[in-house]
Image (cartoon, rainbow, N blue to C red):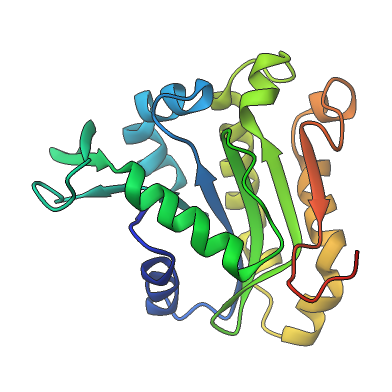
């Protein structure tokens, strides 16, 4: 799990890894939301569990903030370092996402998995999970179970999704995200309803209605 103070900071961090192609996660969850409470509680574990397997960014969260943002609130300590949350920075990140794509925030907790290539995020094939709805409808036993399977998948498939040829990577598109779903637990085949709990959609600004 990685802090994401601003959208630009997230891209700067990705570019620092000199990644050509990959799949990243953007986790939108306020600490008071249904999913957010579970995520914050387990954040130290997630921080180490995700490691370099998958880049999960947390808008609105960060470390070494003391006194920087007027509305910051301490939420958890990771390796002795205090992490805080700012609603202001969270909202600014949401606005940045909306200004760069056709995605619109639901107001609840969401996990977005999307492709990163050529120093840019590709919004044409976004895998979107509605986390609060999944918990509320008992579609998953817990956030921890869902994330554990995602982390395990990322560890096993890292070589698959880091493809050297950009053209080949682009042709995978929808198939890549569908393959991720196919590798996750069997509860995706039954209880979870596409369009209500998760969907794969083109949110690129030039996408047709």
Residue 167, given in percent of the width and then of the height, sits at 79, 86
Q: Is residue 49 visible?
A: yes
Residue 205, given in percent of the width and then of the height, sits at 73, 72
In the rendered image, which quarter is residue 125 located in?
Answer: bottom right
Q: At 89% across and 22% down in the image, what residue appears?
A: 190
Q: Between residue 85 and residue 98, name the one nearer to us.
A: 98
Q: At 73% across and 15% down in the image, what residue appears?
A: 137
Q: Between residue 164 and residue 83, name the one nearer to us.
A: 83
Left or right of residue 85: residue 138: right
Left or right of residue 9: residue 137: right
In the rendered image, which quarter is residue 207 located in?
Answer: bottom right
Residue 179, given in percent of the width and then of the height, sits at 82, 52
Left or right of residue 202: residue 9: left
Q: At 83% across and 42% down in the image, what residue appears?
A: 182
Q: Between residue 27 and residue 147, name the one nearer to us.
A: 27
Examine the rendered structure and indicate whether residue 58 appears above or below residue 16: above
Examine the rendered structure and indicate whether residue 79 appears above or below residue 142: below
Q: Is residue 55 visible?
A: no
In the rendered image, which quarter is residue 85 located in?
Answer: top left
Examine the rendered structure and indicate whether residue 120 appears above or below residue 138: below
Examine the rendered structure and indicate whether residue 106 appears above or below residue 24: above
User: Where, quadrant-wise, is the C terminus in this rendering?
Assistant: bottom right
């Amino acid at each position: 799990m990685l802090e994401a103070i601003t959208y630009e900071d997230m891209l700067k961090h990705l570019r620092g890894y000199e990644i050509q192609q990959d799949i990243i996660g953007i986790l939108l969850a306020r600490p008071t939301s249904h999913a957010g409470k579970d995520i914050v509680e387990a954040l130290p574990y997630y921080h180490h569990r995700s490691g370099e397997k998958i880049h999960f960014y947390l808008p609105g969260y960060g470390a070494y903030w003391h006194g920087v943002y007027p509305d910051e609130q301490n939420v958890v300590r990771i390796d002795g370092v205090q992490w805080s949350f700012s609603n202001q920075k969270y909202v600014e990140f949401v606005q940045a996402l909306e200004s760069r794509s056709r995605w619109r925030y639901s107001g609840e907790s969401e996990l977005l998995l999307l492709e990163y290539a050529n120093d840019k995020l590709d919004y044409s094939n976004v895998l979107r999970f509605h986390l609060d709805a999944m918990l509320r409808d008992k579609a998953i036993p817990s956030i921890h179970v869902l994330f554990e399977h995602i982390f395990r998948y990322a560890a096993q498939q890292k070589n698959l999704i880091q493809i050297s040829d950009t053209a080949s990577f682009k042709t995978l598109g929808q198939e890549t995200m569908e393959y991720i779903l196919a590798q996750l637990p069997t509860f995706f085949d039954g209880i979870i309803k596409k369009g209500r709990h998760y969907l794969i959609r083109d949110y690129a600004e030039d996408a047709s209605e």
